[in-house]
Image: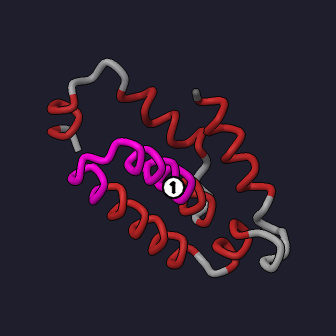
Amino acid sequence: MSDVLNTLAATIAARKDADPDSSWTARLLAAGPEKAAEKFGEEAIEAVIEAVRGDRDRLTEEAADVLYHLLVMLAARDVSLEDVYAVLKRREGTSGLDEKANR
């Protein structure tokens, strides 16, 4: 599964210097980190709405949008997917309650 996310992250990184008129990703990145964050937030809200409604197919579609826009937002701030993986790996085997208490 991570291959799909790794491929998507690499595609997003490759579009950083692309012409914004030729790529939605390039357009989002050219608009700046704030716009990328705004778009991520919009998609996250749409996913929450579908989760509450209980429409599995729509939630699945929105979840894909959330993952894509999360990766764009991370790229806009030069945070790699590998950076995120490292944090998750560090937290592996730690209770969520313990991890939150240690923040």
What secondary structure predominates along the stretch shown in magenta? helix
Left or right of 76, for residue 103: left
* Residues rendered magenta in the picture: 48-69
Residue 94 drawn at (x, y percent): 27, 23
Is 33 or 40 nearer to us in this picture? 40
**Magenta span includes 68:** yes
Residue 2 drawn at (x, y percent): 59, 30
Q: Which amino acid, mark 1?
A: Asp
Q: Quadrant of residue 79?
A: bottom right
| Residue at left offset 48%, top offset 49% | 61
For label 1, the SS is helix
Q: Quadrant of residue 47?
A: bottom left
Left or right of 64, for residue 55: left
Left or right of 67, for residue 51: left
Does residue 12 lie above or below 54 as drawn?
below
Is 95 or 18 nearer to us in this picture? 18
Residue 91 drawn at (x, y percent): 35, 29
Q: Split into 4 quadrants, where in the image is the N terminus?
A: top right
Residue 39 drawn at (x, y percent): 48, 71
Q: What residue is pinned by disc 1? A: 65
Is 73 or 62 nearer to us in this picture? 62
**Magenta span includes 103:** no
| Residue at left offset 66%, top offset 30% | 3
| Residue at left offset 43%, top offset 63% | 43
Q: Residues within 10 Å of mark 1 (few under 14, many from 20)?
A: some
Left or right of 93, for residue 75: right
Does residue 69 lie above or below 31 as drawn?
above
